[in-house]
Image (cartoon, coloured by chain):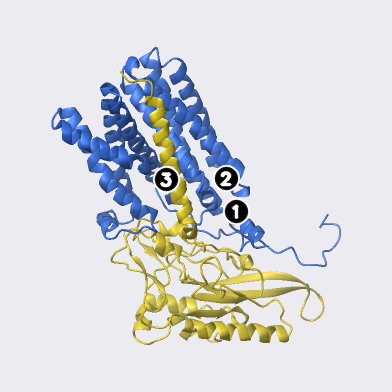
Amino acid sequence: MNPGRERRMVPDATPQSYYDRPVLKEPAWKPHVPVYFFTGGLAGASSVLAFGARVTGNHRLARAGVLAAAAGLLPSPVLLIDDLGRPERFYNMLRVFKPTSPLSVGSWLLVAFGPASVGAAGCELLGVLPRVGRAAETVAALIGPFITTYTAVLLADTAVPAWHDARRELPFVFAASAAASAGATVAALTPVADARPARRLTLGGSVGSLLAFEVMQRRHGVTMEPYRSGPAGRLSAWARALTATGAAVMALVGRRRRSAAVLGGAAVLAGALCERFAVVRAGSQSAQDPAYTVAPQLARSR
Amino acid sequence: MTAERVGFFTDTTLCIGCKACEVACKEWNGVPEDPIGFTGNSYDNTMGLGANTWRHVAFVERPTATGGDGGAGGVRWLMSSDVCKHCTHAACLEVCPTGALFRTEFGTVVVQQDVCNGCGYCVPACPFGVIDRRRDDGRAWKCTLCYDRLKGGLEPACAQACPTDSIQFGPLEELRSRAARRVDDLHERGTTDARLYGADARDGVGGFGAFFLLLDDPQVYGLPPDPVDSTRHLAGMWRAAAAAAGALVIGVVASCAGSRR
């Protein structure tokens, strides 16, 4: 159709928005939030790896896992509290327990996980109270897996199309990526002879996270576009490249050379961080464009 | 709930775009100024609801095939005063981790400003993009349906100020039946575009406490055509999270297996 040649006798097709204004408000979170998704994931998965290493008698690996868990955990509450509009009221998170709020559930998970992981690391470093340390490690390992995945529910339980539509896959993306982060950190902190389980976890987590991220984007329609476009698309590409390269270096060279494990591990960690930023950014992009809100809703109600 | 559920019926066929509702709301609730510029979009410089705009009058200028005098190239005006929908199933309230957002005895959804710690989770949860954080203040703000006035037996400021009764306040059931009669009446008189938005308790948010009579598709007014409270899928999300957590444990077990020494 050429609108320039003849005069339109019918009004324009129904506009899909009000002056192209977004229907949704994008989250007002600072970069603290994706960084926390990364540090929390690292902490949660490291505690599980530490427990696995302890049970199989690999105490060097367990030590690195316990320390990695605490290292991931310690900055987490700082990031979360500083992100609040009223940081001095952070304790209001503990006023209630609300199962309908993933953020409330997550706050309570952190209340349980934080002291356990830090306590375990303290006992390990100081070499005191071994039984208390083991008990703390066990508690941390029990809660750890949920620390890695509740953040995906937190994002999915919103009106943001790129997050809500990915609600079945996002927990797997985050869990796998957290596993890769834990493996990478622990492998870098452990002599190669003892680090085999950590390298395997790095490889498995990396492959799993790349796969889950891909499956997620293929399963759903137009609302996955933001993961491939704009700043989120670039972050996704970086996440993919860094994760794949790092995992390959870790698997191929990391078993002989500690330096390769450190390098590959750093790349995997950077990839995991980029992935969290990509996911958060994709959500913002999908909220900014009214088409991602309106078109799927129209398709569904027809 | 101790009192009857109340709400708004906004009949946009009666809206004349005077913005008395916006002004009354600002004045009564002490809502600060939004940094207003010139948008060039009809007579709308606030452009939507937000932390500092709790009533918002939309102005849609639609070109028509014929003008009022039968000539070509007329403009059809759509004006509509938007507000928080006070959803039956309110995602903002459900995801609020502090309990700052609560359901009042009138069935409305209100933020307790002395509790809100500004986590901002309610902002992306709202399927209408209503609630937002004030930048300087850090907390989340939105329409309270004039909770203080309801407590004192008054109607909300916007409804009282509306000169054409486009904004009608009252018990929700009564408003719903009145709105249904109004649509029938408009259809009989040839306004077949008239339709209710948010009056159906079976919709994705369980029906709005503040619903509308529109003359075009909701998205034309900047409203989502089929809004859903995301929390209705929460059980499935937790199941996926549990499955993923299980997969992580299996991954660690598999990685550590065979390394026993």
CA separation, marks 1 and 2? Answer: 9 Å
Say which of marks 2 and 3 sits in front: 3
**Disc 2 sits on a residue from what chain?**
A
**Mark 3: which secondary structure?**
helix
| Residue at the disc numbered 3 | B242
Is residue B197 rendered to the left or right of residue B187?
left
Q: Local crowd at mark 2 within 10 Å, few (<14), some, or many (≥20)? A: many
The circle on residue A231 is none
- Residue A190 image offset from top left, x and y in percent: 31, 20
Which corner quadrant holds the N terminus of chain A? bottom right
Q: Are marks 1 and 2 in contact (CB under 8 Å)?
A: yes
Q: Residue furthest top?
A: A256
| Residue at the disc numbered 2 | A226
Dot 1 or dot 2: first in sequence order is: 2
Of residues B220 and B251, the one drawn nearer to the viewer in this rendering:
B251
Of residues B88 and B39, the one drawn nearer to the viewer in this rendering:
B88
- Residue A77 image offset from top left, x and y in percent: 29, 45
Are labels 1 and 3 assigned to the same chain?
no
Q: Tell me the amino acid under the disc marked 1.
A: Tyr
| Residue at the disc numbered 1 | A292
**Disc 1 sits on a residue from what chain?**
A
Q: Image quarter for residue B220?
A: bottom right
- Residue A233 image offset from top left, x and y in percent: 56, 39
Of residues A213 and B26, the one drawn nearer to the viewer in this rendering:
A213
